[in-house]
């Protein structure tokens, strides 16, 4: 039931991370604060298609 999703930095728009989520329990898009090695700081990363 878990699907692989890609996380994109909201500052520089680079796709840095992949993770999984259960789409039956979480319908909305995921947003996590993670470290971006291109921005060199912690920024919000949103789920992309």
Image (tube, rainbow, N blue to C red):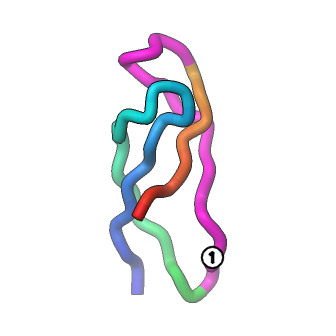
Is residue 37 in the magenta section? yes
Quarter of the view holding residue 20:
bottom left
Q: Is residue 6 magenta?
A: no
Q: Nearer the viewer, residue 6 or 34?
A: 6
How many marks the image carries: the answer is 1
Quarter where residue 49 is shown: bottom left
Residue that label 1 marks: 26
Residue at 48% in and 35% down: 9
Q: Magenta segment range?
A: 25-41
In the drawing, does residue 31 fall left or right of residue 6?
A: right
Image coordinates for residue 11, horizontal then vertical, percent? 54, 27
Q: Which secondary structure, mark 1?
A: loop
Q: Residue at x 35, y 41 (%)?
A: 15
Give the x, y percent position of residue 35. Answer: 49, 25
Identify whether 21 is placed above or below 8. below
Measured along the vertical axis of the image, is residue 2 above or below residue 43? below
Which quadrant of the rendered structure holds the N terminus?
Answer: bottom left
**Lateral position of residue 10 relative to residue 48, left or right:** right
């Amino acid at each position: 039931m878990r699907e692989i999703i890609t996380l994109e930095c909201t500052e520089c728009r680079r796709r840095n991370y992949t993770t999984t989520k259960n789409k039956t329990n979480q319908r909305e898009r995921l947003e996590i604060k993670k470290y971006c090695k291109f921005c060199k700081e912690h920024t919000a990363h949103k789920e992309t298609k």
